[in-house]
Image: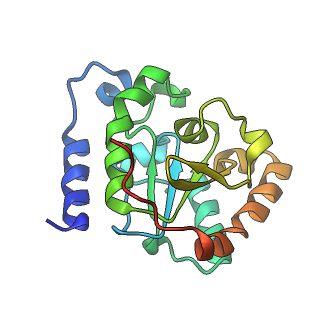
Amino acid sequence: MSAAEELAALADEIRRHRGCGFEPCETCTNPVPGEGPAPATLMLVGEAPGAQEDRVGRPFVGAAGRLLDGLLTSIDVPRDRVFITNVLKARPPGNRDPRPDEVAHARPWLDAQLALVRPRLVVTLGRHALDAFAPGLKITQVHGQVLERDGRTVLPLYHPAAALRVRPLREALQADVARIPALLGRAAQPADPPA
């Protein structure tokens, strides 16, 4: 099976997932596995689906997604050439922050996506996504800085939803996104992640 076929099978598994007892998995309307090609040079990882994503089952389709699409366009990266996912695949009730046990529950799916997509650059969107790759670091201190974690090149960015609410964050996000093309040129293809 090709990586794209395995990714499609994983997405089907995520969409069918229920009965685990974790609140987001039990209360969501539509799990949101993520979308994009495999392999892909660029992978964007958000924290969890929002209300609009939950309605349609696709990542970053609301206002934050429109901002993200505009940012990708500004660096000549078509959305359909990027793999986009979230740490959590189901919306937490009331759009609350993901809990650590929920993140741990969903982590195997993210790890499988990373292995299949094999991105040269992983861009984390927001503090919860950053925490999945670099626990303990603060987004306010490391946004826009390249991190090497577990053989992967990671670029932490502010979440587009936060940038919509706070103008200085939007300006920082735009500046940080502008670095992506140069980073894609120098980021090495990662080795298989550690077992």
Q: Is residue 10 left or right of residue 52?
A: left
Quarter of the view holding residue 90: top left
Looking at the picture, how far across and down is residue 98, in whole percent? 50, 28
Looking at the picture, how far across and down is residue 66, in whole percent? 59, 62
Q: Residue furthest bottom?
A: 76
Identify the image quadrant of the N terminus. Answer: bottom left
Using the image, determine if residue 31 lies above or below residue 103: below
Q: Is residue 106 left or right of residue 5?
A: right
Looking at the picture, how far across and down is residue 189, in whole percent? 47, 67
Which one is in front, 27 or 182? 182
Identify the image quadrant of the C terminus. Answer: top left
Residue depicted at 74% across the width and 55% down the height: 144
Using the image, determine if residue 2 lies above or below residue 109: below
Which one is in front, 96 or 124? 124
Q: Residue furthest left?
A: 1
Residue depicted at 54% across the width and 26% down the height: 96
Residue depicted at 24% across the width and 23% down the height: 20
Q: Is residue 180 left or right of residue 174?
A: left
* Image colouring: rainbow
Using the image, determine if residue 55 lies above or below residue 43: above
